[in-house]
Image (cartoon, grey):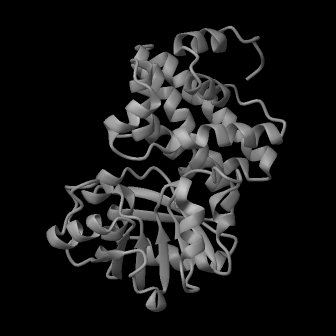
Amino acid sequence: MRTIVVGAGSWGSAFAALLRNRGHAVTLAARDPDQAEAIRATGRNPRYLPGADLSGIATSTIEDAPHAEAELVVVAVPSAVYGDVVGRLPGTAPILSLTKGLDPGTGERLSTLVRGRPVAVLSGPNVAEEIARGLPAAAVIASDDLQLAVRLQLATNSAIFRVYVNEDIAGVELCAAAKNVIALAAGGADGLGLGDNAKAALVSRGLAEMRRLAEASGARPDTFAGLAGMGDLVVTCWSPTGRNRRAGELIAQGSTPDEAVAQIGMVVEGLTTAPVLRDFSRRLGLELPITEGVCAVLGGVALTELVQQLMRRQPTAE
């Protein structure tokens, strides 16, 4: 399959290597011409994923990629620019979205921004560095077009990357957005040294928030118990390399959000998604205390004060 991977960050680069290893012809298209040239010259991504072997993968800018020949376009760009990027992509090849978040401008799911071509989303507990090292992982591909999802499943499934199909595209995308916000809070618990009991309780209640979000949005609650929900939430909240967890930890230790992003050196999607998800839930009439709390901390409320507020909430049934 002739494939273009749009976005040469860590996950885009790792996924391009995964597709190459499955025998597909892959072009990795970067937004930055200098980055495209660096990857072409070295066979590596020195900025975002230096350990990954990208040899055998063609490299270009997004504008210069062979869109007319593509049979699949994989999109792995930050949510803040997703709508602009997909709106400019020529051709009619199906899009497989790897981006996890909501559109900051409209508050909508990212797949709804794709016009005039089929779309699917891939999500799950997929740490890019581990995928690049060939460690085993699993993911789910969701689409309103079941035939497309199955075709992409067969194109990406391998002995080290097991892919499942799910028709609940709304649930999968909402999981991907919400888990990053919960991971910011989990990182905050790490930064304050609150212990594993507190962190596990926080993540469990975060999963409950995600489930309520699913029910109110018409998504399937069982999606939130699967790879895109609980699976991705667990790895995002515990992985040492998780950007959102690490950002929460740094903020708890005194960094501003901007300073945390600068230290991490990559996009932290939860920081963009948190206020969008809060507003999305309010439109549905939902109460998401952890999401609201994360937004409060990003707005300047002390994290220790937030912890006290959450612990003093009126007791209720689980």
Is 196 above or below relative to 63? above
Q: Tell me the quarter of the picture where residue 132 sits.
A: bottom left
Is 248 above or below relative to 73? above
Q: Quadrant of the N terminus?
A: bottom left
Return the x and y of residue 125 as percentages of the image width and height.
45, 49
Closer-to-camera residue (53/257): 257
Q: Outermost residue toward the left?
A: 42
Residue at x 31% of width, y 69% of height? 33
Q: Is residue 84 left or right of residue 190?
A: right
Return the x and y of residue 106 as percentages of the image width and height.
71, 54
Q: Is residue 300 left or right of residue 16?
A: right
Residue at x 50% of width, y 73% of height? 153
Q: Outermost residue toward the bottom?
A: 69
Return the x and y of residue 71 as percentages of the image width and height.
48, 86
Residue 202 in sight: yes
Q: Tell me the quarter of the picture where residue 294 sits.
A: top right
